[in-house]
Image: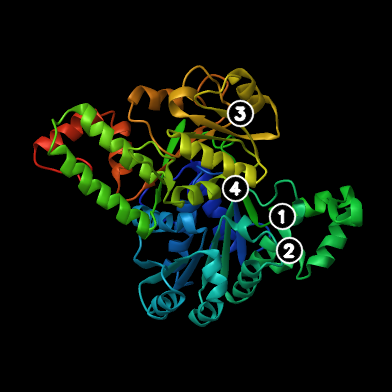
Amino acid sequence: MEQPVPKLPMPIRATPYKHQVDAFNFVCGKFGLIPAGGMASPGAALLMEMGTGKTITSIAVTGTLYQTGKIRRVLVVAPLSILGVWDEEFDKFAAFDYTLAVLTGTGAKKADTLRHMRGTPLQVAVMNYESAWRLEKELQAWNPDLIIADEGHKIKTHNIAASKAMHRLGTKARYKLLLTGTVITNKAIDVFSQYKFLNPGIFGQSFYVFRNRYFDMTGYGQHTPVLKRSMEQDLMRRLHCIAFRATKAECLDLPETTDIVRNVELEPTAMKIYKDLVKDSYAELGQSEVTVTNILTRLLRLSQLTGGFLGDDAGNAPQRISTAKQAALEDIVEDVLQEGKKLVIMARFIPEIKAICSLLEKKEIQYSLIMGGVKDRDVQVSAFQTDPQVQVFVGQIATAGLGVTLTAASTMVFYSLDYSMSNFEQAKARIHRVGQKENCTYIYLIAQGTVDVRVIKALRDKADLARMLVDDYRNGFNPFSSGR
């Protein structure tokens, strides 16, 4: 099969895959940048599953709009846990001039940053959904030409504050992109709010007119919308007229495995505790024999802390000091399940696993679990592999990394990492094995500025982490610093 050619140059520093070129051409056609069949539209949806490259495609579209003189200001709205991803991806891929600011801090600080984002080159402001509605007045004044709603299913409920703000902002923007795995999971009614943002001409301005046209209200109290069979074809035709769909199963040119490092920022209080522990650990090393065991023992406590928990030497229950990784995981769980897919979560430490299970229970998500002490391993694996209701598998790396097949999922999250190369490779092989029909995506939650950075680098480089740390110490460096 010949590689398709972009009908305009894609201003990115990468060779795009076929489906990314197709998606780029599709959006450029909708935006009137190239001749295209079908209707033009001020908004388009990239319904691309995790790991297929929604962000790089959006960056290419953004650069093309800028280079053709169509836009000067871009607003990216995304879940809090992935704001930094946009900064990293622009830095890595954008082959055009831009200035990007991730808006953080107080509302006043965000507003002040926004006010100073004027002139050339292209100005890109990145913020979360809550900030977008709280700063709606300031954003209206800033007047973005292009708005990108990342993980756009966050605005699937039409009458919440964030959705209403995005609808109003969308009416003024010349161009809009919505990125998500799919706009529909179990409820087709979810498309209305997302499409009201993109192009109200598709499904109209009124939720109730839309609902009455496409759905019968059933169940107790008539609160359950059921899509009318006679209207199903019309709804899908309208939905796809401004949407490009890409699934991992269809993207035949994707690599067999894709690694995604999701950088997580620990809260300031947690980071202070972490840095104090780094100093203490380094000082303790100086008072004892420097051995692999001594270094790894101290590294272990630092790794536990990056996952949110701090134990003590007295054997008391670990104290929760951070929820940063859990917040990032929550967004990933929502994204993958939104796509109608299953997910495997691997973690090293028991407190993390218990916290993950509590999160899933709170969200009423059924899961299988293998960790130390679980006897019915076969039952847990079978439920995940065969029961559509069991959407998540939670595993402890040391105990779930061997002898189980988890090919019902093609995405695995490493909440934390084992230092053992064999445990790491074995855990990854649970989804990437015979029976897997899709390319596999691995997501690593890495706390910035911590030992997580060194651990993932050593594992991916197949380096001996313990030996590396001992050598660092003997060469006069703090082995627990993330800086080397």
Q: Nearer the viewer, mark 1 or mark 3?
A: 3
What mark, if any, has residue 202 been given in the picture? 2
- Looking at the rendered structure, the secondary structure element under dot 4 is helix
Q: Which mark is residue 408?
A: 3
Q: Which residue is mark 4?
A: 334
For discs 1 and 4, the disc positioned in front in the rendered view:
4
* Label 2 Cα neighbours within 10 Å, binned few <14 / some 14-19 / many ≥20: some
The residue at the point 47 percent across, 55 percent down is: 81
Cα gap from disc 2 to disc 4, whole angstroms: 26 Å
Q: Pick the residue in front: 83 or 117.
A: 83
Tag 3 or tag 1, which sits nearer the N-term? 1
Q: How many marks?
A: 4
**Residue that badge 1 annotates:** 239
For the residues marked 1 and 4, what is the alpha-carbon distance in whole angstroms? 22 Å
- Of the pair 308 and 161, the residue shown nearer to us: 308
- Relative image position of residue 262 (x, y in whole percent): 42, 47
Lateral position of residue 424 relative to residue 367, left or right: left
Marks 2 & 3, CB-CB < 8 Å contact: no
Coordinates of residue 159 in the picture (x, y in percent): 71, 67
